[in-house]
Image (cartoon, grey):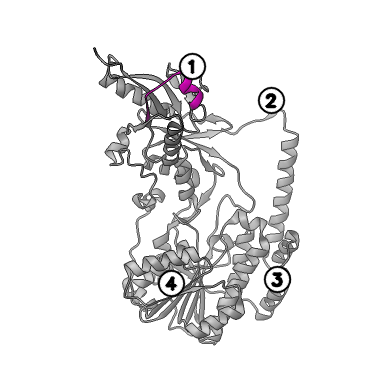
Amino acid sequence: MASAPTRVLILGTAESCASAIEVLHAQDPLGRLCEVVGIAVADRTGGGSEGGGGSGGGIDLPQTTLEGLDGFSREHPFDVGLICLPSAMTRVAGRARAALKAVGVPARTLPLLGDVLDGADGGGRGVSLDQIDLLGLVGRASRPIDRALAMEAVGGKRVMITGAGGSIGSEIARICARFSPSELILMDRSDNALFEIDRQLARIAPGVRRKVVLHDVVDSDSTLRRMVELRPEVIFHAAAHKHVPLMEDHPAAAVNNNLFGTKSVADAALSTGAERFVMISTDKAVNPTSVMGATKRLAELYVRSLNSEKRTRFSLVRFGNVLGSACSVLPIWASQISEGGPLTVTHPEMTRYFMTIPEAAALVIQASTIGGDAPFADRREVFVLDMGEPVSILGLACRFVETLGLEPVIEEDGESRGIVPRPGRVPVRIVFSGVRPGEKLYEELSYSAEDLEPTLVPGVMAWSGERPERAEIARMVADLSGVRGTDDRETVLRAIARHVPGFARVRAEATVREAEEAEISVHPPNKGSVQHAA
């Protein structure tokens, strides 16, 4: 007597479940091997009625969710759970396996064709940014590093990197290690980050002498003692608070780290006779609308004020967003995809300048050599990396989703923008989350008064204008010193605004806008009177 067919529950997105049913039917048209008893929609984008019958997604089978699997299994017993999900959705697959284990049913995997062709057939590798052509996402060719310039910058030098465990700082360290520094001094206040970059360098550059320094640069007395002991010749200052929304709520911390942390290291560089000090800055310091950008602007002003007839050469390198850095947009999107979506984009018109981490770090190192033979009075000190054209964040999100073999579906006000997923592609929703406090729709790399000129280093432009008055900078430092320890957010914001032209106006406009939005949320307009742009 023939054995009864295996009862199968398919777990996946609505689309991948439909594909799995087609595959099973093609291979077992008479249902002798297996009987599909239902589907469990395992992503956040799918439909399906809790434990009921129904035909959501065009599937005329009983449907449930992962959360409803226990009750569903009692009403519709099954022998095997067949997980059919894109390999990028690792966390969703993990939840599906856990749900099956909870009801005592074994899990099996049915890979999607796209994953099989990509060599990811059920391996659960998830989204690996290392496997993605990041420059291809922003439509730009790679820039090879000028090895002679890199050797000139760090070869035979004692090189210190603050924030050495961060995305940019660690990449600067990795690149420097390739060009024979006499010593690499890795400074960071995060023990985990410091341990990781030291471990990497021990593996990839075992012959390079390293000194690991667990230290918070905000402590100026300790910073000076450390640098008197270490005597770095070249300093790349990458330590900073960088997260825009977080700094909106913690402006005193931003002042402390971004301004006074920079001041601490720069003053010590001057006192110990370092050859070069290079501050890593950001496009958000140009006409800043955020606390993070404004405090980086304050740091820029302080660093530029130090250039004089002294031995140390101070400069800053300004660039935009880096692709793939910790907590930047791509890792966030990768995490959202692993959860099944949706991807969040703040605004459909938002643009940003982008560069890869290795590209930015290499240009920072090369830029540090510019103007070394010129008199101090003639030296250019503000360097801006050529970031190419600004990139649409929405377009970047769509290309990122497509790179993973998935189908982007843009959703606004709960409705899709008329996009029909291609056959065989699992859709991933893209939703708009709204511009956060301090964010701009677009960024600028330079002020209008900064007349940028090309340099001998391709991809680096330079500007040298009138330096800030030392007396004005001294007043700025004294004023902001008084708010370093306060918890009064408005007091700190007023102090910042006194020294960053335009920041007070921007904050006032933001306050009015937030009040208007709050009023609208309390008293929404009549929907019949609202007109939507095409």
Q: Are marks 4 and 2 in contact (CB under 8 Å)?
A: no
Given residues 393 and 532, the one toward you in this image is 393
Question: What crowding class fits label 4: few (fewer than 14 Cα within 10 Å), some (14-19), or many (20 or more)?
Answer: many
Residue at numbered disc 4 = 367
Q: Secondary structure at mark 1?
A: loop
Q: Nearer the viewer, mark 1 or mark 2?
A: 1
Mark 2 is on which residue type? Gly
Tell me the amino acid under the disc marked 3: Leu
Looking at this view, name the residue that lies furthest to the left: 1
Q: Marks 3 and 4, how far apart in space?
A: 30 Å
Q: Which residue is mark 2?
A: 528
- Amino acid type of the residue tagged 4 in the rendering: Ala
* Amino acid type assigned to the residue bearing label 1 in the image: Gly
Q: Which residue is mark 3?
A: 480
Secondary structure found at label 4: helix
Q: Secondary structure at mark 2?
A: helix
Question: Are there few (<14), some (14-19), or many (20+) residues within 10 Å of tag 3?
Answer: many
Task: Determine whether label 1 and label 4 are within 8 Å by CB.
Answer: no
The quarter in which the N terminus is drawn is top left
Structural distance between the alpha carbons of marks 1 and 3: 64 Å
Residue 34, percent from left and from top = 31, 20
Residue in view at x 56 percent, y 82 percent = 224
Q: Is residue 327 above or below residue 386?
A: above
- Magenta residues, start to end: 70-82
Distance Cα–Cα, label 4 vs label 2:
57 Å
- Does 424 sit above or below residue 338? above
